[in-house]
Amino acid sequence: MDELKVVGQPLLRPEGQDKLSGKARYVADLSLPDMLFARLVTSPYAHARIRSIRTAAAQRHRGVFGVFTAEELSVRGLLAQDEVFYAGEPVAVVLAESEAIAEDAADQVLVDYEPLPAIVDPIAAMRPDAPIVRPLNEGHEDEAAIHGADVEGGQSGERKPPNVPTLLHFCNGDVQHALAAADVVVRRTYRLASVYQGYLETRGCLAKVEQDGRLTVYSSTQGAFATRSVIAQTLQMPDHLIRVVPMTVGGAFGAKFGSFEPLAAALAQLIHRPVRIVLDRIQDFLTSTPAPAAQIELQLGARKDGRLTALSARLLFDTGAQPGAPAGIAAILLGGTYQIPNFDLIAMEVLTHKNPSGAYRGPGAPQAFFALESAVDEVARELRIDPIAFRLQHASQSGDPRPDGKPWPKIGLVDVLQAAQQDPHWRDRQAGQDEGWGVAVGGWVGGLEPAAAGCRIDPDGHVTVTVGATDLTGTATAFQAIAAETLGLSPQQVHIAFGDTEHAPYAGAAGGSKTTYTVGLAVQQAAQAARSQLLEVAAQLFEAAPEDLELRNGAVQIRGVPSKRMSIAEIAVQTMRFGGKYAPIFAYGRTAIREPSPAFGIHAVKVAVNRRTGAIRPRGYLAIQDVGKAINPAEVRGQIMGGIAQGIGRALHEALLFDEHGTLINSTLADYALPTVSDVPPITISLVEIASNVGPFGAKGVGEPPAIPGAAALANAVADAAGVRLTSVPMRPQDLLAALDLL
């Protein structure tokens, strides 16, 4: 590691200039001959029976090509048929020559609904006499599988309440006895609102049928191959007949794993013209897959000597109208971060008549750590023990068991806690009147998915690395650095080609903090293999053994004889010429990693509270995170800053609000309070590098952890500043004022 020349150095993002200058091309910038624009007709009711859909008026609208309902489409599930299960569910789609015409015509589609009772409250949905929210097919893809959390062994044989498709139960010891014997017990119910991912670019796609019948789909997607699979499964087509072209993505955060691509593809097949679906902001809100709301009933017990003895938790995730909430991930993190001998954890996802939930930067983890870290902090305060020292006493280490009985792999939780103890921002912290400090831990299990990469050395000495990943967050710079370091080149000599599903090797979706960890390792292997091929060709040109050669500063030389050298370009040109004697230098790397590399961080925040207005203002922020090895420290720090901003938004501002009928009432950015630059205080970031045993150069995923501890850290800071414990987020001024009135 001490000899690394590229890895660990800050690099500029190669696509940054195009994004800043407006030259980057998004789905909304695409236009094809004969293309039609789609506009969704969505249900205003959270639950209703569809009596009829009258489209004649819309069909007569000038410039309208057609109006399509579930009856016109041969593929089921693309549009609601007979019944709707959430407000915003699409029931029809208008195709027109422009977006404006499509929008006007959509307003003329008349749908006759019979409103039905809507179940909006997950507690009500679980009552024995509750009606079924919706019928479900057997089996569903769990959010844990998508994001790399293995929760086998947690499935419970217990009888499930109504509308609970998943119930997981982890237990050990005698929790009730341990709680009864504890000297301090915190009993709280924590609540977290559903939140919107808040990306800049709304969801969009464009589908076209080629002359040979194959499909080409342009998509704002986190994963081209994942989107291809969704289309193939929905349309019952072979994967190889579908080409997904990933476009520049204007933010995703877990919400762009494939949404309306199958609908666009089915329409394009039906009418044999290109179809583009780009949602406006209101429709994006209405059809979104937000992070689920959660309620966590928790009891945490400890002895006077500071030893945690018991943890009981009942986690309820409001999964909306489809299963898939991250209950298993949340249970593992809540019960596995600290070693507590007696625990009883029940995690459930509950169906309601609201938008189906989706992923958002560490799905399940912000909810779990808000409850866990709030309770741990309260116990530490009750026992008058330093909050970090208290956490260190119980922090899980490599090899310790998780709630599912599996051992933690190599983790750096203790290391980040120790770094926080020693950091002067925390050690020398000061607080004035109505100011306070809070600290909280957050971590992520780390995702896994197979990946491959290709590496070619061109005659000019430059290298092209081809991957099937999506560059959401500057992973191009990480791949550049990895390949350049391996080949002894500068990053400027490496080009990263993000290919489509027809031309690129397989890569998993960009989610679960796994892109650099998995695809980056494939890039490293491909570069190593290309390096070996390069040395083999050079050995023949030098008439020397490959082991006698070394690669330095873009050239191959005989070890110890620097005067005998050839540039990479001089060697590569010998492999790409008429009558050449040497095979081209082209190599693959392939990975199927079986061991995750969890990443933990700790946040400390200073807040000021206004006892008159209830305002909560962050004044300073410290984030310490284990990153394994920062391939590009500038990008890593940017990821952490973004995660902090999102954590502040979740803690103080953001919530999707539904009325008693299940209708979303804040479906614009004028009504939904995203954090602004004025909400984010000065940030200090410290990187801890506990090298992964697997990742390239020891790297770990860094995307999820910084978005996880914020809500708990802020709640703990408010408790320190105001002396009251807020147990629901967002923590609004009226919530603080109400709590202060109870003093």
Image: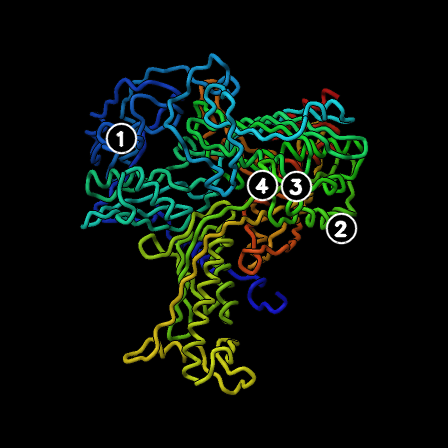
Which residue type carries mark 3?
Val
**Kind of element beneath mark 1:** helix
Sequence-wise first label, 2 or 3: 2
Residue under numbered circle 4: 406
At label 1, counting other C-alpha atoms closer than 10 Å, the crowd grade (few under 14, some 14-19, many 20 or more) is: many
Residue 668 visible in the picture: no
Give the number of the mark in front: 4 or 2: 4
Q: Residue 50: give x, y in percent of width and height.
A: 30, 20
**Disc 3 versus disc 1: distance between alpha carbons?**
51 Å
Residue 111 or residue 521, whichever sits in front: 521
Residue under numbered circle 3: 441
**Kind of element beneath mark 4:** loop
Residue under numbered circle 2: 422
Give the number of the mark in front: 4 or 3: 4
Q: Is residue 547 above or below residue 217?
A: below
Sequence-wise first label, 4 or 3: 4
**Residue 726: quarter of image:** top right
Which residue type carries mark 2?
Gln
Give the number of the mark in front: 3 or 1: 3
Q: Is residue 55 above or below residue 396?
A: above
Which residue type carries mark 1?
Ala
